[in-house]
Amino acid sequence: MIDTPSLVDQYCHGVLRTELGLGTFEAHLARSEGPPAPGTTFFDTQTGFAVRRWCPPLLGLEPHCSPARYLARRRELGVLEAGRRLLRGSGVTTYLVDTGLPGDLTGPREMASTGDADAHEIVRLELLAEQVADTSGTVESFLANLAESVHAAAANAVAFASVAGVRHGLAFAPEPPGPGEVRGAVGRWLAHRPVGGSLTDPVLLRHLLWIAVASGRPLQLHAGLGEPGLRIDATDPVLLADFARATAGLGTDLILLHGYPYHRHAAHLAVVFPHVYADLGAELVRTGARATAVLAEILELAPFGKLLFSSGARGLPELHVVGARLFREALARVLGTWVAEGAWSLADAQRVAGLIAADNARRVYGLE
């Protein structure tokens, strides 16, 4: 039996504080630009089936019960009690929470209380820059305030996260932009940006990445499957190879988030570059019953000290449960099979499981 009593979720978001109807709940199961196919719902996905497998027992129902019965029970308990039961039933002992999403989501302190766990903040760079822009009237004040804000965030957060791949794609120039280039980009952005406007300028996105690298905090980079409307080929993690090469030896670790369906590419970069790590997040949640096969593919190549568990969950506490349960089940099956076949010893399998589940994250983020 492969056991992982401690589980550090190295990348997730908070959960919604509001009650959800059937349609709203389903919308959070799949990131889609449109409705599900006629005659189906978003429960008719690997993620939806995994929710019905793992979550009903935590609310006192039988596995695989109907979505309507499950959501009725959820409403009966109330959003707070249902969230408490689900998060505490996930088995996660530490949450690293990206606080950069809009909406009424719980923060690290509330996640810790509800889940009876530890929690730490991950600061999203683009949101930080947008907040600075809302209060900075000139190029000079923006650049000074941005540098100060990143420095202040680094004193409290365990990591920075960037959605440059989501906003622009990962095929950006690897070197830091020059001062004149940055000032010009800031001037154009501030001149045309409405209050609250998103940062999409590739020069400023690169500038943010390099400020974060200089902080020494781990830098998480979104890759692979992302938001609806995004060309997935623009987020292949292999496109980060030049940036990884440019940042080698500077003391900042890079963590490639959600690499699926390019998870083998992320594993390859983790082999090549000492400071690059691969995340096991959304690929397991999205592949559901196929999570064991996907995890085995990642373990084909990546060094075991370079893999980090995460749920990648956002909005629904159910996704935290599914991420943790699928990971534990898949890991036990993959490593247990290798032990049964005599390829691995049980002691080695248990040690590697501990590394991926928690110990690697503790080391990378300084959580000891």
Image (cartoon, rainbow, N blue to C red):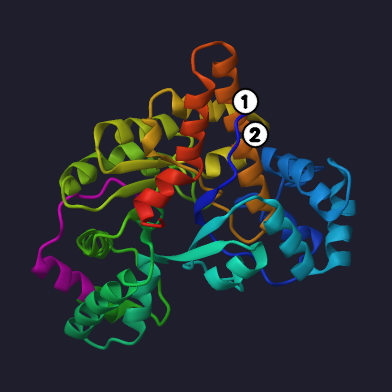
Mark yes or no: residue 105 visible. Answer: no
- The N terminus lies in quadrant: top right
Q: Does residue 205 sit above or below 275 in this rendering? A: below
Q: Does residue 298 sit above or below 230 in this rendering? A: above
Q: Position of residue 148 (x, y in %)?
A: 24, 79
In the image, 58 versus 263, the foreground residue is 58
Residue at 28% in and 50% down? 253
Label 1 secondary element:
helix
Label 2 secondary element:
helix
Is 180 contained in the magenta span? Answer: yes
Residue that badge 1 annotates: 333
Tag 2: amino acid: Glu
How packed mark 2 is, by other alpha carbons closer than 10 Å (few <14, some 14-19, many 20 or more), is some
Mark yes or no: residue 150 visible. Answer: yes
Q: Which residues are magenta?
A: 167-186
Tag 1: amino acid: Arg
Residue at 63% in and 29% down? 290
Residue at 28% in and 43% down? 240
How packed mark 1 is, by other alpha carbons closer than 10 Å (few <14, some 14-19, many 20 or more), is some
Left or right: where 188 falls relative to 343: left
CB atoms at circles 2 and 1 under 8 Å apart? Answer: yes
Residue that badge 2 annotates: 329
Q: Does residue 49 sit above or below 207 in this rendering? A: above
Q: Position of residue 55 (x, y in %)?
A: 77, 49
Q: Position of residue 355 (x, y in %)?
A: 45, 39
Residue 136 lies in what quarter of the image?
Answer: bottom left
Which residue sits furthest front? 347
Left or right: where 128 falls relative to 91: left
- The C terminus lies in quadrant: bottom left
